[in-house]
Amino acid sequence: MSKPDELIIDIAARVESGQTSQMSLTVVTPGAVITGRLAPESVWRQRVSEVLTDSADLSAFSAVFDAPAKTDRPPTHLHFHVARILQGTMGLPETGGMYRVAIEDISAWTVGDLSYSDL
């Protein structure tokens, strides 16, 4: 979006403020439809760091995600967990993944997490 939608910024700000971690959203970006649940950036960073720490090959990168999230500005990204990229009649990965999406790249969105039965 050349001018990001104020509604999506408000949703992101509420998630960041810790008011909810149960907000499900589906977004359309160039080349992908992503569906899942939003998380505050700090929680998202922590979970990514934990996954990297447990990896023999990638553990050195975990420190990048340990830096605190900047909270002195409006959100610029959505942080999805338990999320899937929708491709045809399936979601990848099946168990859900961690995605960071720039709000300015969202061209459309809807409240809710599309399930496999919706596809």
Image: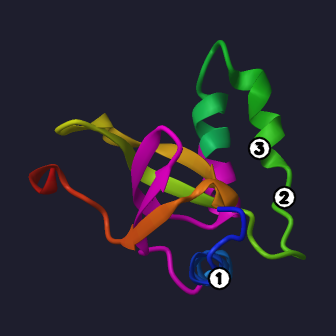
Was residue 38 drawn as part of the magenta stretch in this picture? yes
The amino acid on which the numbered mark 3 sits, given as a three-letter code, is Phe
- Mark 2 and mark 1 residues within 8 Å of each other at the beta carbon: no
**Residue 6 has which mark?**
1
Relative height, residue 25 to residue 50 (above, below): below
Compare marks 1 and 3 and give the one earlier in the sequence.
1
- Mark 3 and mark 2 residues within 8 Å of each other at the beta carbon: no
Left or right relative to 97: residue 100: right
Residue marked by disc 3: 65
The Cα–Cα distance between marks 1 and 3, rounded to whole angstroms, is 27 Å
Dot 1 crowding, Cα within 10 Å, few <14, some 14–19, many 20+: few
**Residue 68 has which mark?**
2
Q: Which quadrant of the figure has residue 88?
A: top left
In this picture, which residue range is highlighted in magenta?
A: 19-47
The amino acid on which the numbered mark 1 sits, given as a three-letter code, is Glu
Residue at 14% across, 57% down: 118
Q: Position of residue 64 (x, y in %)?
A: 82, 38
